[in-house]
Image: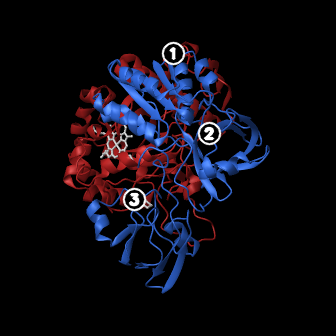
Chain colours: A red, B blue
Amino acid sequence: MTLSPPAHTTASAASAPAPSAPAPPAPAVPIAARAVTLPFPFPADQYRYGTNVEAAPKFVATEAGGWGARVLDIDADYASELAERARIVQRDPSRCQTLEHMRPAVWDTITTLLPILATEYPDLMAYTRDGRHCTWRNDLLGLSLEFTVGDDSSLGVDPLEFISGQIQDDIAILDEREGALWLDAGVVTFAADWCLGFDVGMRFAEIHGPVPRVHGERIVSRAEQFLMHLQPGETFRRTNWSMTVDRRLDTSTDVYPEWGRDRRLIEDDPNFADRMHLRVEVQHLIRLPTSGAILFLVRTYLISLAEIATVPAWRERVGRVLEELPEDMAEYKGLTRFRHQAADWLLAP
Amino acid sequence: MSAVLADTVPPLVSTPPIPNALSLTLTSVVDLTSQIRAFTLRAPNGAVLPEFVPGSHILVRCGERTNAYSLTGSGVHPLEYTISVLRLPGGAGGSTALHALPLGTTVQVSRPRSAFAPVATAKHHLLIAAGIGITPMLSHLAAARDWNRSVSLLYSYRPGTAAHLDEARGFGIDDLVESTTREQFRRTLEQRLRSQPVGTHLYICGPQGFTDAVLLAAAEAGWPDKRVHYELFGAATLDPGAPFTVRLARSARSVPVAAGQSLLEALEAVGTAVLNLCRRGICGECALPVLAGKPQHRDLYLSPEGKAANDTMMCCVSRGHENELELDL
Ligand code: HEM
Ligand code: FES
């Protein structure tokens, strides 16, 4: 079995000092399980935007453990996150959209991601392909099926909905034409304060319109150039982050009334450190091999301040980042009301 | 860069090995015409090869030369790569050396590169090919068939010299117009350029003179540039560059950088660690201070002004000229 440890237990071994070593200032609590595999996004005490892309997959060790050995990360939340995605799409079909010209790219996504899953989780999943005929087995879902590439009816559901039901990542697919990238298909149920319904059909530069700083610093145009130079099959990744109250994955602008209120009321909550979460996104960028589209996967992780505090180095690092973050970036990320409170809590002696 | 004939790139005297190459076995050779030979390459173990976008090409290494050829099969789950090579007068572009390869030879080829892709939003695809320029159109036709795309092909060739003619006819497209004289082609083109459905995209491949003539005719007929596409080789990737040497001022050392090797790799090879992340010239991590010499900037990170200042270079992609570069390392 290759899954990460269950989310509700703690990985005490990771923090137990070796018996012979001189006892370090032992952390009062063991490292939280969610910390062990968290893609920790802060390389320094100061955070600024950049074109922070690197080739993937690649394992990265952290103070708490490590992450990144696989492109598609499946963890203990697999079943619950997929169920949540299905509920959201059912309620609001605008979360899953394929513009007509993107059908080949959607199938390209399926025939690219299923073999990756089968390779990365060989005990749980299996994929075969003979010409256009494919078989797929996913033991985590008790699923076993045969389908024909390009034949939507052979899947029984919308092809994009099908593939988004196999992975925890949100999916965006960008078409390249006229020297630009266009967001023309996707399944986005766990957006951090944006929504597919508004952005679908937009250019890369327009999508990034609301982000402060990045235009003057040419980050967006540079990133787009980079993506358009990716060759078929190439896979890169980057991280991004924000903060969210509670373990709420769906912070889409579509449902702002549901979560905006929590952001306003959180400051007075006695359980502040348990309810306030760091939200980390690992974003993979893959040039699809037969359609030439860019596949953008967003895998979201939530970890509470209390859990972060079980890793002393992170406690301080996150505290410093939040304390120092320039106001325009804090405002854009929606952290203005609580980031100093969070920093103070983390940096308290 | 201008349009080039389908199977030529500017001749290189001696080119470095193809990075990240596939070693494939030549399994079949068929003469399509007296001058054009089709080659089939397979993985030694029969494995599926990397898929590719319609209109893609591969680099093929033969002897000391590397040339680009369009892949003529379907890019979907391919078990083989096929290319068709025109024997050029005097063997230009390594065509004679390739024609001489015996069956069973192991050939080094690059992964497929896409530089002539169909536009997904096009309402209609008008493919215009002359001679060996038919080669990249075949994968376009295969994809058009697979996805029910509306497509026309104008194929111009001299009688008796047409490669892939039966194959092109075999796709069963409604609209295939063959021309065997210049005059016939000129008339067809004239008429077609003025009678296309809105949203048609034009794809051109053939000898330079042919491509230029079609581009001109399209411009005169009022076609916007963004709906006109022609085959370009080499634009999709950085060329390996020439060898050069850098001086490291602080450690008073010289480090040679080979063709096809990056400065970053060369520094790592001599034990000089440099911070890096993307290794693609976009993140800015690997910036190095330049004390003397003019870097050949190839990154996407520095602004035009930053490049002109010549005091910083991104060592993962940018290079030097011969031995004039001095770094603050
Ligand atoms: C190398 C590639 C990329 C870079 C460097 C980049 C950079 C950024 C940055 C710095 C932000 C602000 C994030 C924050 O503070 O929370 C952002 C937001 C965003 N990015 Fe990207 N991005 C990249 C690729 C993509 C792609 C491929 C998509 C495809 C859909 C995308 C969609 C978005 C969206 C929807 C937002 C939120 C914008 C809003 O507030 O409405 N990004 N990006
Ligand atoms: S490593 Fe990113 S620019 Fe060189």
Sequence-wise, the earlier of marks 3 and 2 is 2
Pointer 1 residue = A157
In the image, A145: left or right of A287? right
Judge by depth and name the residue closer to the eye, A333 or B208: B208
- Residue A42, above or below A139: below
Considering depth in this image, is A15 or A163 the residue closer to the camera? Answer: A163
Parent chain of label 1: A
- Residue located at (30% from left, 56% from top): A48
Front-lying residue, A129 or A17: A129
Is any part of residue A142 visible from this angle? Answer: no
Question: In the rendered image, which residue does mark 3 sit on?
Answer: B299
Residue located 31% across and 25% down the image:
A197
**Ligand 1 closer than 8 Å to label 2 CB:** no
Q: Of the residues tagged 1 and 3, which is closer to the observer?
A: 3
Q: Which mark is residue B50?
A: 2
Mark-to-mark CA distance, 3 and 2: 27 Å
Alpha carbons under labels 1 and 3: distance apart: 44 Å
Residue B194 seen from this side: yes
Q: Amino acid at mark 3?
A: Asp
State the residue lying farthest toward the bottom.
B252
The percent coordinates of residue A153 (x first, y second) are: 54, 12
Badge nearest the viewer, 2 or 1: 2
